[in-house]
Image: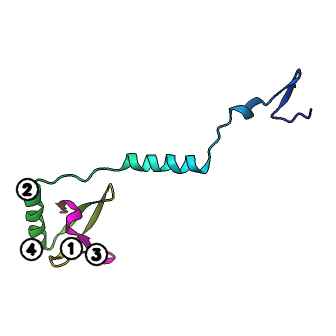
Amino acid sequence: MKTTKHTKQVGAVSDRGLIKWQGMLLTEHVRLIKAFYEEQDQVPKPELTEFDLQAIQEEVEIAMSRRCEVQLKTWKNGAFFTHTGVIQEIDLRNGQLVYEDESGRQRLPIESLVGIQLVD
């Protein structure tokens, strides 16, 4: 029997050495493990109370009247995102908040907005 650096001959039995302890991952395993970890990282959308919505509305009105920079916190597909810019307008017809940042005018769906903070 032929022996390599990974195998050796022990009596009549071929010992595979460390090869027998190597893990085996199939592409299906990798895909399922990746999906599992992505699912674990997801955050449920926070339920905003009437008080929270009122506070957000007041902050938006203050930011629009002062034309000051704000940090907008949004939720989408299980993750939070932060956007920084100056609020230009609220498009009630399309349900979007229009703000301007260094790359130009951006639009955010109002229902994805979960927080706002004025930047001084």
Q: Nearer the viewer, residue 32 or 89?
A: 32
For the N terminus, the quadrant is top right
The amino acid at mark 4 is Ser
Seen at 26% across and 61% down, the residue is 74
From which residue to which does the magenta span run?
102-115
Q: Is residue 102 above or below residue 112?
A: below
* Direction from residue 24 to residue 17 in the image, left or right: right
Query: Residue 116, percent across and down?
Result: 18, 61
Query: Residue 112, percent across and down?
Result: 24, 63
The amino acid at mark 3 is Gln
Q: Which residue is mark 2?
A: 50
* Direction from residue 50 to residue 73 in the image, left or right: right
Q: Earlier in the sequence, mark 3 or mark 1?
A: 1
Q: In the image, which disc is placed on residue 65? A: 4
For the C terminus, the quadrant is bottom left
The amino acid at mark 1 is Gln
Measure the alpha-carbon separation of dots 4 and 1. Answer: 18 Å
Q: Earlier in the sequence, mark 2 or mark 3?
A: 2
Helix, strand or loop for disc 3: strand
Measure the alpha-carbon separation of dots 3 and 4. Answer: 19 Å
User: Is residue 96 part of the magenta span, yes or no?
Assistant: no
Main SS, magenta region, reads strand
Query: Residue 20, percent across and down?
Result: 72, 32
Q: Is residue 39 above or below residue 59?
A: above
Q: Which residue is mark 3?
A: 106
